[in-house]
Image: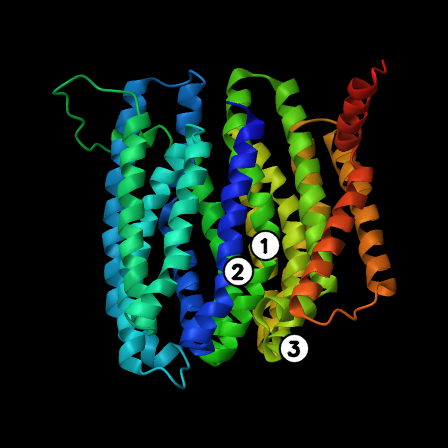
Amino acid sequence: MTIRRNIISNYVSQIYTAIIGIVMVPVYVRYMGPEAYGLIGFFALLQGWFQLLDLGLTPTMMREIARFRGGAITSQNLRQLVRALEGIFVGVAVLGALAVLLGSGFIASRWLKAQQLSLVEIRHCIMIMGVIIAARWISGLYRGAINGFEKLVWLGGFNIMIATLRSVFVVFVFMTVGKSVTIFFVFQLLISILEMTLLVAKTYEQLPRIAAGERLPWKWDPIKGVIKFSLGIAVTGSLWVMVTQTGTLVLSKLLPLKEFGYFTMASLAANGVMIISGPISGAILPRLTKLAAEGDDAGFLDLYKGATQLVSLIALPTSLMLAAYAGRALWVWTGNPEIAQQAGPVLALYAIGNGLLSLGAFPYFLQYAKGNLKLHIIGSVLYFLIYIPTLIFATIKLGAIGAGLSWVLVNLLYLLFWLPKVHSRFFDNLNAEWFKSVAAILTPALLAVVISHRYLPWQAPTRMFQGIILCGIGLFSIGAALLGSSRARKVFLGRLRMTHGIR
């Protein structure tokens, strides 16, 4: 199984899932209204905060399976670890669901500012959310296991199936059963139960077999061997959840539910930058961990540098295009001038911030694979201490625009000042080469967007034609970025020599 096939599989599934999710948002708004979509945005917020309870166990599962495949641990140890993690996850899921159920009344009446939806319906929806989040939480553990086994082609196909059921088939439910937001969440609950069941079955198919009749009772001991690494992930993961979700949490309190729905749409559009770079990290993390376990530093660095250029080639042009044409992109997507006007500036800022974030994630990949998260913990704490006060102050003063400005500023500071320290800790002379390769890709991509923004006429008569123009600008920017990539030039020249017989 090649790393290329894993990356392609991740891309196909995640891009499909992203496109389906993005395409269906205007449909949801049309059927249920923007206030109901604000409630869906609050559901995503709750799901994000639930990750505080992960304690680093999901990435630990993925890493230990990768180490098992690299010969670092035995099959018996792996099975015992899986059983221990399952017990923890089920317990946390039950407690988390109960907490949401008990707090549903307070959230409906005291936190959210609804104007059209009734408090009773909002409360019922929040209670259903609690059960959905618990089911998806358990599914996350098994997704990590399947990822660790590098069964990413199967996982990609599975994710496509679930995304289709979750996002598209709900329209059939709207048409035949009803279009209330309660019906929407009941349907999501049924799909989440199906998803969890199938992931459990696939994980156990991949795990090493145990002797017939042998039982593996739940024990705490298997956790002890990985608790240090897991807690390192937990600290940084918890900080990261607070960093990414605090602004949304503050806005969910300050804004009316309808306006919060608009903000959620802008955030979702900006997340397209992370969606197109995420498949690469999902594919390289198990392989980087395996190379580190084998002591192959040359292979490790080659993969790390190549993945950096690949992410830069895709994420940077996309973030620049979205920032330059945020309002038009939202209008093409939703057909709603009000959404485009209100959410456009927010989309522009979050697109830039997410472009920076896609690059700032690479030091974490390095430390994760090496099993040394000390600097990552320190960096995350510093990030948190700077970002949260800045975010709260800016959000209270400027609303969603302030949240976007904070996001850009802190991600830029992290990339420029903390990333070099991490690189120098593990590899000499890596930092200069890394920044040089990123700058070589960013410069022509930025130039392409500036040229298109200044000289390209916008007389396209319909949303479809304007959408085609936006896609063309994105491809133009990516094509320009390819000129700055040493890896892309090497591949191109190699193919040219093979085609024409040049040596």
Point 73% across, 47% down: residue: 416
Q: Which residue matches tag 3? A: 341
Q: Is residue 474 left or right of residue 46?
A: right
Point 45% across, 18% down: residue: 70
What amino acid is at disc 2? Answer: Ile
Secondary structure beneath label 2: helix
Q: As displayed, is residue 89 above or below residue 307? A: below
Can you say which quadrant of the picture contains the C terminus? top right
User: Which one is nearer the viewer's eye here, 205 or 430?
Assistant: 205
Q: Which residue matches tag 2? A: 22
Point 34% across, 17% down: residue: 74
**Residues tagged 3 and 1 counted as in contact (Cβ below 8 A):** no
Q: Residue furthest left?
A: 213
Say the numbered circle drawn on residue 15. none
Residue 43 spot, x, y in % from top left = 39, 64
Residue 191 spot, x, y in % from top left = 31, 53
Q: Is residue 352 left or right of residue 502?
A: left
What amino acid is at disc 1? Answer: Gly
Secondary structure beneath label 1: helix
Q: As displayed, is residue 233 above or below residue 173? A: above
Q: Quadrant of residue 57?
A: top left
Mark 2 or 3: the one toward you: 2
Q: Which residue matches tag 1? A: 272
Mark 1 or mark 3, which is nearer the start of the sequence?
Answer: 1
| Disc 1: CA contacts within 10 A as few (<14), some (14-19) or many (>=20) | many
User: Which one is nearer the viewer's eye here, 105 or 488?
Assistant: 488
Q: As displayed, is residue 389 above or below residue 199? A: below
Q: How many marks?
A: 3
3D distance between C-alphas at marks 3 and 1: 20 Å
Residue 492 spot, x, y in % from top left = 78, 28
What amino acid is at disc 3? Answer: Gln
Mark 3 or mark 2, which is nearer the start of the sequence?
Answer: 2
